[in-house]
């Protein structure tokens, strides 16, 4: 095994926040890189108390603990007498130590405090276990995982203050043998004709969240940036304030495709703040907003902005979803919250497991609502059923 300084190591060394979330595909070298950083940190700083945690002791022995001992031996720093095999604790000469334990040991979760924490494959442990460990950690927290599906990290941590988030892939790990690289990349070709391999490549090849079963909007694709000649045709606005985020999503037409570009996703915004944001960011198009907020719409219109209410009929949500699915849709790379919402936007099921025509927004739907509003208003479909354009009746020029 090679322990040279890979791109993965270089990228992780740049993280500075208290909570450092490392999402990645297979063979990205996440575990090795974090352990290398922690070993260096322990050796160069006195009296650091570092806990490496996973779902079970067997899991640790097969993974992080095995890698830890392998790294020390490769660096010629391993001393058998410094490793307590009963407590799985390695003591450094400067008073620092790295210990290994699992979340199926309740006394450990609510036990001693530590300076630093690393939870390996954190998607395998419950959020309550993370909370118990986090409140007993005074300095840095490392989390890594393969994104097979959405879980508590997506809802509770990503995007929060003092939190770094990075996605890594096998391409960041230059120490990989060429034979493994070729094996991984076989899935890329298989993904063109197989749903299974498409999802496998998404998770383990690209390090992106796997497609949940029953996704409401499954076929969108990411685009790095807006084409120069893409035309802005409208924007959607969903109001929020304390808990819910105010969201603005621009819609662009490009050849026979549509592109969603998230430009605002923020809490605590008053109507004057929204107006100033629209003006400062030169969103020069019709903006379509939730008609449940007529006072907010009126106040924003008083500032000279063309914002119109969208009335939601009984079937408007499903109609909007279907309309998006009927078109070829791209989402800009910077639209992080819209992508996060879409990854957790699935159809509800009844007790018998039957799919219902009602979305279950596991990770929110504020940006999605904004996207629906503008898509429905721009694409005036005569078959929109119970959905109608309220602003045409009220605001006549």
Image (spheres, grey):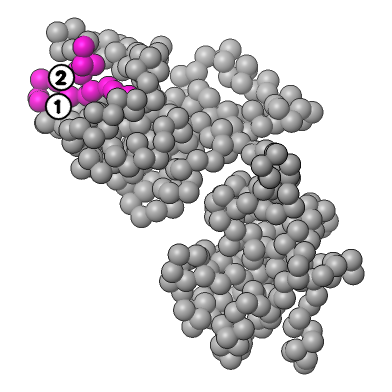
The residue under the point 46% across, 33% down is 123
Q: Is residue 330 visible?
A: no
Residue 217 counted in the magenta span:
no
Give the image location of residue 353, x and y in percent. Answer: 70, 39
At label 2, counting other C-alpha atoms closer than 10 Å, the crowd grade (few under 14, some 14-19, many 20 or more) is some
Which quadrant of the structure image shows residue 198? top right
Up-down relation of residue 182 to residue 290 (above or below): above
Q: Quadrant of the N terminus?
A: top left
The residue under the point 14% across, 27% down is 96
Up-down relation of residue 366 to residue 213 (above or below): below
| 2 and 1 marks in contact (CB < 8 Å) | yes
The residue under the point 64% across, 74% down is 290
Count the marks: how many? 2
At label 1, counting other C-alpha atoms closer than 10 Å, the crowd grade (few under 14, some 14-19, many 20 or more) is some
Which secondary structure, mark 2?
Answer: strand
| Residue reaching furthest to the front | 351
Q: Of the two numbered discs 2 and 1 on the same chain, state the one appearing first in sequence.
A: 2
| Residue reaching furthest to the top | 80
Give the image location of residue 232, x and y in percent. Answer: 71, 68
Which secondary structure, mark 1?
Answer: loop
The residue under the point 29% across, 13% down is 69
Residue, disc 1 = 96
Q: CA distance from mark 2 to mark 1?
A: 6 Å
Label drawn at residue 245: none
Which quadrant of the structure image shows residue 128? top left
Residue, disc 2 = 91
Give the image location of residue 256, x and y in percent. Answer: 83, 56
Residue 87 counted in the magenta span:
yes
Front residue of 8/323: it is 323
State which region is magenta.
Answer: 86-102
Front residue of 47/9: it is 47
């Amino acid at each position: 095994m090679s322990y040279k300084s890979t791109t993965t190591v270089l990228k992780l060394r740049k993280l500075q926040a208290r909570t450092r979330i490392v999402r990645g595909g297979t063979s990205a070298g996440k575990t090795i890189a974090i352990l290398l950083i922690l070993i260096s940190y322990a050796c160069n700083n006195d009296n650091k108390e570092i806990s490496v945690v996973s779902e079970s002791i067997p899991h640790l022995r097969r993974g992080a603990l095995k890698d830890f001992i392998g790294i020390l031996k490769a660096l010629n720093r391993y001393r058998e007498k410094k490793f307590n095999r009963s407590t799985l604790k390695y003591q450094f000469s400067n008073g620092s130590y790295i210990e290994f334990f699992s979340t199926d040991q309740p006394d450990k979760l609510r036990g001693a405090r530590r300076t630093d924490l690393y939870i390996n494959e954190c998607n395998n442990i419950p959020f309550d276990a993370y909370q118990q460990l986090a409140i007993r950690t005074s300095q840095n927290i490392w989390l890594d995982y393969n994104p097979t599906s959405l879980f508590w990290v997506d809802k509770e941590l990503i995007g929060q203050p003092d939190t770094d988030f990075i996605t890594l892939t096998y391409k960041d790990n230059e120490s990989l043998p060429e034979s493994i690289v070729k094996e991984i990349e076989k899935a890329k070709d298989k993904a063109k004709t197989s749903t299974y391999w498409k999802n496998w490549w998404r998770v383990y090849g690209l390090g992106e969240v796997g497609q949940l079963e029953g996704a409401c909007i499954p076929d969108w694709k990411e685009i790095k940036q807006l084409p120069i000649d893409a035309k802005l045709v409208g924007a959607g606005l969903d109001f929020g304030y304390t808990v819910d985020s105010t969201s603005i999503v621009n819609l662009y037409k490009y050849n026979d495709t549509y592109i969603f570009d998230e430009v605002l996703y923020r809490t605590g915004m008053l109507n004057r703040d929204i107006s100033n944001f629209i003006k400062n960011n030169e969103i020069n198009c019709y903006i379509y907003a939730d008609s449940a907020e007529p006072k907010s719409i009126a106040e924003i219109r008083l500032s000279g902005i063309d914002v119109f209410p969208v009335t939601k009929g009984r079937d408007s949500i499903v109609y909007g979803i279907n309309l998006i699915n009927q078109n070829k849709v791209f989402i800009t790379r910077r639209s992080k919250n819209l992508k996060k919402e879409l990854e957790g936007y699935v159809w509800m099921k009844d007790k018998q497991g039957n799919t219902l025509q009602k979305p279950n927004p596991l990770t929110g739907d504020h940006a999605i609502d904004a996207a629906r509003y503008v898509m429905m208003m721009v694409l005036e479909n005569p078959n929109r059923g119970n959905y109608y354009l309220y602003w045409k009746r009220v605001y006549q020029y």
